[in-house]
C-alpha cells in the first residue's frame, strides 16, 4: 500500500440522491441495461499515460504535478504501478491501457529498454492476478523520443523503421503476455510537416508494409485480440496519414487488411477531423471496422486535442446509440484517454474525474438503450427509405442509365420532396436524455 490516496474511499454506486462526491450516482455495474450488465456494456478502461506519466505541462510551462513516482528508475516505475493499481481498485474499473514508455524507464539501449519493460510486465502480471483489472489494450509510444521526430514506420531513415518495428514487437509481446484484448496503433508522428522534404507515396508504402508485419506477427504468436488503428487528422504533425475512419478504411483496403484491422475512435480526434463522434462511429460500423473508443472530448474552441473527461450526456448518448445499434462492444471498450487540467493537483482530482466521467457514460448508455428499445427513431429512419423496399427500386440498382431514362419518360416520374423531420427527431431524442 502506498499513501498517495490515503483517506479516499472506494467509489461505489449510491444512487442519484447521495450527497457525497465520492460515489457513483448512475454507474451501477450490475444493473441490467438492454440485456447486459452495465459494466459489460461500457467496459471502462483507465489510461496509464495521462494519469501517471504526464507531468502537467503545456506549451508555455512545464511540470505542475509533483508525484513521488516521477523519475527514471525501476523503483519509480514500481511505485507508479503500485499507485496506479490502487486507483484501479478505488474506481473498480475492469480494464486499463498502457504504452511501453508509460510503464518502464527508457534504457541506455534498445536491449535495456526491453529488459525494463519485461520486468515491469511481470510486475503488472502479479498485480493483475491478485485481482487487478484486465488489459483492454497495449500500444507502443513511437512519438515522444526524439528518434521518432520524423515518424516511425514512415521515417526517411530505415534505422528508425527497424527500431519502431522492434519496439512494436516487444509491445505486442507485452500485450499478449498480459492477456490484452486489443493492440492499438495510433500513428503518433506518421504524417508530415512540409511536403518540401516529404515523399508522401513512399511513406504510405512503408506504413502499409509495417502494418502488414504487425498482422503477420499477431497470427504468428496466436494473439487473439483485435488490431486497432486510432485515426487522428493532425497534431502532432500537420498532416497525419490516418486522418479519419474513411481514410483508414481506404488505406486498409489498399493493403488488403480491411478484414484484419479495426479502429479505435477517439471523440476529440473526430472533432479535429471536422466530424461528430457519432459520425465516425456510424461510419466505422457501416464498414465493419468498429473496434473500441477513447471517450475523451475536445474543447470546441481550441482546435487542439485537449483530452478532457466527458461531461456532455446528450453527446455521449448519441455515441452509445451508434455502438448499441452496431451490437455493442466485443473486444473493445470505453477507454478514458483523458487528462486532468494542469491545475487539478490533488490525488482526489484523479478519482473524481473518472467517477464523474463514468457516471456521464452510464447516463448516456441508459438513454441510448431506452431510445433504441423505444424504436421510434429506427422506424422513422426505415420509413424514410421505404421506397427502396419496392422490387422495382431494387431492380433499378441492377439496371443502367438508358433503361432508367426510358422508365422516367414512360412513367412520367416526377419526385415529390418530403420533410426530413429533423426537429421532430431531435425532440424525440430529448425525451430520452
Ligand atoms: C493521442 C492519442 C493517444 C493514443 C494512444 O492523441 O489519443 O493517446 O490513444 O497512443
Ligand atoms: Ni488523442
Ligand atoms: Ni487516444
Image: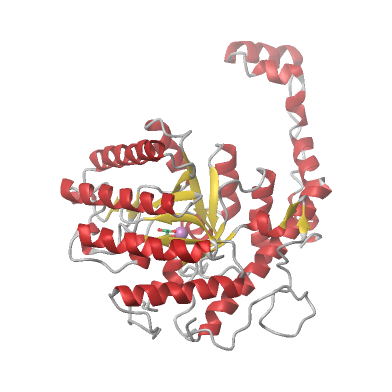
Instruction: Indicate whether 202 appears above or below 108.
Output: above
Determine the residue positioned at 65% across, 76% down: 11
Image position, residue 21 (x, y; %): 67, 83
274 or 362: nearer the viewer: 362
Image position, residue 109 (x, y; %): 18, 61
> Relative to 430, is 126 on the left or the right?
left
Give the total of numbered labels: 0
Image position, residue 176 (x, y; %): 43, 49
Question: What's the image's color scheme?
Answer: secondary structure
Camera sees residue 150: yes
The C terminus - image quarter: bottom right
> Relative to 162, is 34 on the left or the right?
right
Occupied quadrant, residue 276: bottom right
Determine the residue positioned at 64% across, 15% down: 404
> Relative to 297, is 76 on the left or the right?
left
Camera sees residue 230: no
Determine the residue positioned at 23% across, 55% down: 150
150 or 120: nearer the viewer: 120
Q: Residue furthest bottom?
A: 7
Instruction: Indicate whether 327 appears above or below 408.
Output: below
99 or 50: nearer the viewer: 99
Determine the residue positioned at 62% across, 13% down: 399
Image position, residue 301 (x, y; %): 50, 69
Amino acid at each position: 500500500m502506498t499513501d498517495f490516496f490515503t483517506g479516499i474511499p472506494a467509489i461505489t454506486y449510491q444512487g442519484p440522491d447521495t450527497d457525497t462526491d465520492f460515489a457513483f450516482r448512475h454507474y451501477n455495474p450490475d444493473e441490467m441495461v438492454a440485456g447486459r450488465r452495465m459494466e459489460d456494456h461500457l467496459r471502462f478502461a483507465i489510461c496509464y499515460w495521462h494519469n501517471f506519466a504526464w507531468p502537467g505541462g503545456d506549451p508555455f510551462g512545464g511540470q505542475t504535478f509533483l508525484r513521488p513516482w516521477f523519475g527514471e528508475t525501476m523503483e519509480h516505475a514500481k511505485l507508479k504501478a503500485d499507485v496506479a493499481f490502487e486507483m484501479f481498485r478505488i474506481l473498480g474499473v475492469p480494464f486499463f491501457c498502457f504504452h511501453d514508455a508509460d510503464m518502464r524507464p527508457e534504457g541506455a539501449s534498445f536491449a535495456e529498454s526491453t529488459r525494463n519493460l519485461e520486468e515491469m510486465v511481470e510486475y503488472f502480471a502479479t498485480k493483475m492476478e491478485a485481482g487487478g483489472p484486465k488489459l483492454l489494450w497495449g500500444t507502443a509510444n513511437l512519438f515522444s523520443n526524439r528518434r521518432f521526430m520524423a515518424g516511425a514506420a514512415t521515417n526517411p531513415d530505415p534505422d528508425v523503421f527497424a527500431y519502431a518495428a522492434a519496439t512494436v514487437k516487444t509491445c505486442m509481446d507485452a500485450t499478449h503476455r498480459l492477456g490484452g484484448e486489443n493492440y492499438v496503433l495510433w500513428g503518433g508522428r506518421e504524417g508530415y510537416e512540409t511536403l518540401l522534404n516529404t515523399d508522401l507515396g513512399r511513406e504510405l508504402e512503408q506504413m502499409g508494409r509495417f502494418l502488414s508485419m504487425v498482422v503477420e506477427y499477431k497470427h504468428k504468436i496466436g494473439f487473439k485480440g483485435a488490431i486497432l488503428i486510432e485515426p487522428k487528422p493532425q497534431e502532432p504533425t500537420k498532416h497525419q496519414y490516418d486522418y479519419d475512419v474513411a481514410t483508414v478504411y481506404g488505406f486498409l483496403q489498399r493493403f488488403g487488411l480491411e478484414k484484419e484491422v479495426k479502429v479505435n475512435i477517439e471523440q476529440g480526434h473526430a472533432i479535429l477531423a471536422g466530424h461528430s463522434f457519432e459520425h465516425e462511429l456510424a461510419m466505422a460500423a457501416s464498414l465493419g471496422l468498429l473496434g473500441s473508443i477513447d471517450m475523451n472530448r475536445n474543447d470546441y474552441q481550441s482546435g487542439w486535442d485537449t483530452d478532457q473527461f466527458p461531461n456532455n450526456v446528450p453527446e455521449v448518448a448519441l455515441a452509445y446509440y451508434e455502438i448499441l445499434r452496431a451490437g455493442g462492444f466485443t473486444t473493445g471498450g470505453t477507454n478514458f484517454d483523458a487528462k486532468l487540467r494542469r491545475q487539478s493537483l490533488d490525488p482526489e482530482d484523479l478519482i473524481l474525474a473518472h467517477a464523474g466521467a463514468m457516471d456521464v457514460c452510464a447516463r448516456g448508455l441508459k438513454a441510448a438503450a431506452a431510445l433504441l428499445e423505444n424504436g421510434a427513431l429506427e422506424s422513422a429512419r426505415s420509413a424514410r427509405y421505404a421506397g427502396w423496399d419496392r422490387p422495382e427500386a431494387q431492380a433499378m440498382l441492377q439496371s443502367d442509365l438508358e433503361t432508367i431514362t426510358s422508365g422516367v419518360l414512360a412513367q412520367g416520374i416526377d419526385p415529390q420532396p418530403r420533410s426530413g423531420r429533423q426537429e421532430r427527431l431531435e425532440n424525440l431524442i430529448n425525451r430520452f436524455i
